Image: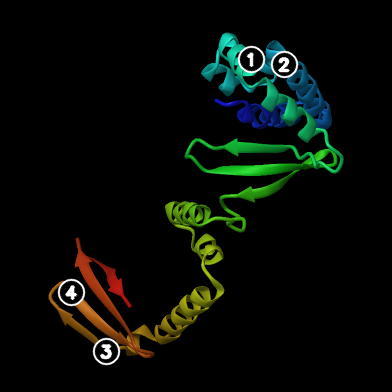
Amino acid sequence: MTPNSFLPAVWFSICAAGCAASTIPDPKEAVNAYAEAAAKGDSDAIYEMLSEKSKRGLSPDEVKKLVADERAELSDQAKAVTAPGVIIKARAKVRYGDGEDASLDLEGDEFRIAAADALPAGARTPQQALSQLRRVLARRSYAGLMQVLTPATRSAIEADLRSLVKGLEEPEALNIDQTGDSATVQIPGGHKVKLKREGGVWRVDDFD
């Protein structure tokens, strides 16, 4: 961990405390405390502000060495985080057992949902877009999938599905080409559906 990692770790502690307590602490107090400790090079104070996860990765002696080696950078950080016009935001992240998560931003004295896997946020990088795609596919979420696609692709898929739904309005009237346990059906609108019987039960094997 570098000194640049200290501030995010401190913010994580703010969020965790805000979620657990009945009275949400002012994140400015923690940021000011960090700035004061960074300006003084107070490694003990900085260590106490780290999240429990960060403490497991760094010992007090390691933090002391980092602070000593990067005293000038920490001093610049202290000035930067307390400069006029700096906006301080507190965020909480909830991670579920299946790996999905949700982020909440502190607005006033309440946490509000900023992003959740069931409500994909606008991706700022290609990697974020891929991560969203993976999540909605893992949940088998059609609604989620529609949210991560471009408007043109979403419109094309929805039009294609509407055409398929319309073509299946009267399944009894469709011409089914059956051979043994396999069947192929040409659907009005240009779609084709392949079916297969397994264990006496017919299931859709493929469609386009």
Q: Which residue is mark 4?
A: 182
Could you tell me the amino acid type at mark 1?
Answer: Ala
Image quadrant holding the N terminus, namely top right
Percent x, y for residue 190?
34, 88
Percent x, y for residue 127?
49, 53
Of residues 148 and 170, the one nearer the viewer is 148
Q: Dot 1: few (<14), some (14–19), or many (≥20) neighbours within 10 Å? A: some
Mark number, residue 141: none
Of residues 186 and 138, the one nearer the viewer is 138
Q: Which of disc 1 and disc 3 is earlier in sequence?
A: 1
Using the image, determine if residue 182 lies above or below residue 29: below
Of residues 141 and 2, the one nearer the viewer is 2
Could you tell me the amino acid type at mark 4?
Answer: Ser
Percent x, y for residue 85?
85, 43
Using the image, determine if residue 113 lies above or below residue 120: above
Which residue is drawn at the image coordinates 27% and 83% (left, top)?
Answer: 185
Please tell me how many numbered marks the rendered image carries: 4
Q: Dot 4: few (<14), some (14–19), or many (≥20) neighbours within 10 Å? A: some
